[in-house]
Image: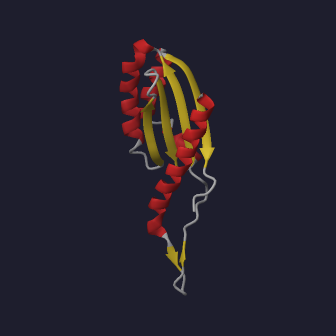
Amino acid sequence: KMGLLRIFLCSVILASADAFVGARLSSVWTTSRGGARHAPTMAAAPLAMMVEVVIEESRVEAFKEALKIDVEGSREEEGCLRFDLLQDSEDPNKFVFYEVYKDQAAADFHKTTDHYNAWASFKAEGGVVSQSVIKASAIDFS
């Protein structure tokens, strides 16, 4: 069951990142002398991550408070293209973070911010039963 969920979520990541980046880049297309439009090229594909965590039931509210800070701050980062927090419909203690950064440098910068520290501090205090991370790169961002 979890394998299918991960496959589905990876396909959602790639599809939504493709649409999001395509929309952002549509305003920077170039036109050649002959009038043909050319799509922009990117130096590196955006980095997408899915972080799945299971939180101790007694710590769910503290987790939500910490992630509210992280999510809101992350969405203000220049290199963060998307940051969502999802809660499993069948297991209220299971959450998925869906993050897309313009490149690895932006993802690395994210981990230096005060708002990320809200999540890091929560983890250090305990309450994370399990955590898994899936990193994905775009195959086609044209």
37 w.r.t. 1: above or below: below
Q: Residue at x 43, y 39 (%)?
A: 84
Q: Position of residue 4 (x, y in %)?
A: 60, 34
Q: Residue at x 41, y 22 (%)?
A: 63
Farthest residue, direction bottom: 34
Q: Is residue 105 visible?
A: no
Q: Position of residue 18 (x, y in %)?
A: 53, 55
Quarter of the image where one finds residue 39: bottom right
Quarter of the image where one finds residue 6: top right
Quadrant of the snapshot with the N terminus: top right
Q: Is residue 138 visible?
A: yes
Q: Residue at x 60, y 51 (%)?
A: 138
Q: Residue at x 57, y 63 (%)?
A: 142
97 w.r.t. 78: above or below: above
101 w.r.t. 95: above or below: below
Depth check, front residue: 5 or 66 = 5
Q: Position of residue 104 (x, y in %)?
A: 58, 45
Q: How many marks?
A: 0
Q: Left or right: where does residue 44 sit relative to residue 116? A: right
Q: Position of residue 95 (x, y in %)?
A: 47, 28
